[in-house]
Amino acid sequence: MRKILKRIVSPILVPFVRWYLRKERKFVYNGITTHIFPGVFHPGFFHSTKFILRYLAGKDLGGKSFIELGCGSGLISIVAAKAGSDVTSSDLSLKALENTKHNANLNKVFLKIIYSDVFDSIDKTQFDWIIINPPYYARKPESEQDLAWYCGENFEYFRKLFSSLKDYTHSASQVIMVLTKGADVNAIQGIAKEYGYELELLKENPVFFDEKDFLFRIKSKQA
């Protein structure tokens, strides 16, 4: 029944979302107002951002070093900064970085905003928290907007992530990543294993129809 409903609703829902996101939109989360630029990942329409934020709620972020890889609109970074973290926000999309800067100014918080492909332009720092909302579909991105969704035909994003992660963590670092059922989670877990990591499932989040998001903690198998 869910699959039938999905086939009926998707042809209507997908064009509507694309139409809606063609303009800058306002989005409010727990009293934090953001503006979402066209082409930037929208935390209201896509559930992964709110899934991460629900996990972070109540965590002690005060005085912690915190990096958001793939910051998009900057909402997670802003929440962490308001909780007292020293926040670095990075993205490979210039539009996303512009959007994050705009929202940081709007909410009067300081973020260290860096253009970076994963950790390429990040000084080697052992972060207390690393939050990753990655592109997870195995396809080559053809546009800046695609960078939020496609990790490369051979999962290049994840190979770059897991090969460099050790330089940015300490024994107590919390490395949190969200994936979706539609991604090849087994392939991503296999790449993590190649580089000495495992994905510990923390939470599952049913979204709609047969969709589901997964929240993982990335752990070194040598720890």
Image (cartoon, rainbow, N blue to C red):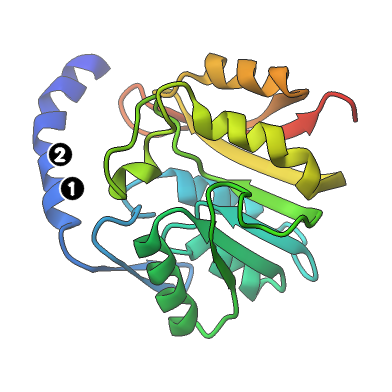
Asked whether the viewer can see residue 57, the reply is no
Front position in the image: 37 or 57: 37
Locate the N terminus and report the quarter of the image it occupies.
top left
> Could you say where residue 135 lies in the image, as x and y percent from the top left?
44, 38
Per the image, label 1 sits on a secondary structure element best described as: helix
- Sort mark 1 into few (<14), some (14-19) or many (20+) by Cα contacts within 10 Å: few
161 in relation to 70, above or below: above
Per the image, label 2 sits on a secondary structure element best described as: helix
Amino acid type, residue under disc 2 in the picture = Leu
Reading the image, the residue beneath label 2 is 13
Amino acid type, residue under disc 1 in the picture = Val
Reading the image, the residue beneath label 1 is 17
Please identify the quarter of the rendering in which residue 136 is found.
top left
Residue drawn at the location 80% of the way across and 70% of the way down = 63
Asked whether the viewer can see residue 88, the reply is yes
> Could you say where residue 196 lies in the image, as x and y percent from the top left?
78, 23
Instruction: Report the side of 11 relative to 223 (left or right).
Output: left
Residue drawn at the location 66% of the way across and 57% of the way down = 122
Instruction: Report the side of 163 relative to 113 (left or right).
Output: right
- Residues tagged 2 and 1 counted as in contact (Cβ below 8 A): yes
Instruction: Report the side of 80 relative to 196 (left or right).
Output: left
